[in-house]
Amino acid sequence: MPTIKLRSQIGRDGILHLDIPSDFKETEVNVTVTFEAVQEVSEDLASRKEERKPRYNAWGNPVVEQSITQAISGMRRLQKTVALPKSEILAMREEGRRF
């Protein structure tokens, strides 16, 4: 008696769809369904945190939350410095439509 083990998802309609291998076409079979709820990912995440290796940026410095925050704030400052005013962008777009 072959056993097929798979992970599937029950849809919002409450129906579980199973794709059966092609060698069981037009055959009468006895089917036993066992439901086992899949445990949430929290256990996997906890084990992944332990296995997580430190990451380093292009300069060899460790990537931590503080360095990411500093990088984002630096990009925002740069954006304010070099960004074109909205009125200039609109004028450039209108200029481009003339051609």
Image: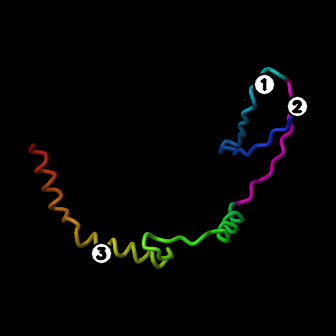
Please report the residue visible at 13 percent of the width from the left and 48 percent of the height from the top: 96
Asked whether 44 falls inside the magenta stretch, the response is: no
Q: Name the residue under label 3.
A: 77
Identify which residue is drawn at 85% across, 38% down.
Answer: 3
In this image, 45 relative to 59: left or right?
right
What residue is pinned by disc 1? 23
In front of the other: label 1 or label 2?
1
Determine the image quadrant of residue 99. top left
Quarter of the image with the N terminus is: top right
Check disc 3 and report its element: helix, strand or loop: helix
**Quarter holding residue 44:** bottom right
Q: What residue type is labelled 3?
A: Arg
Answer few, some or many: residues within 10 Å of disc 3's Cα (few below 14, many 20 plus, some between 14 and 19). few
Quarter-wise, where is residue 89 in the image?
Answer: bottom left
The magenta segment is 28-40
Instruction: Please identify, in this view, whether the residue under mark 3 or under mark 2 is nearer the observer.
Output: 3
Amino acid at circle 2: Asn
Residue 30 disc label: 2
Up-down: is 11 above or below 89?
A: above
Q: Is residue 32 magenta?
A: yes
Q: Residue at x 19, y 64 (%)?
A: 84
Locate residue 84 relative to residue 8 in the image: left or right.
left
Q: Which of 89 and 45 is in front in this view?
A: 45
The mark that comes first in sequence, 1 or 2, is: 1
Establish if 59 lies above or below 96. below
- Residue 19, horizontal then vertical, whole percent: 72, 33
Three-letter amino acid code of the residue under disc 1:
Asp
Question: First in sequence: mark 3 or mark 2?
Answer: 2
Spot the residue most to the top: 26
Magenta span: predominant SS is loop
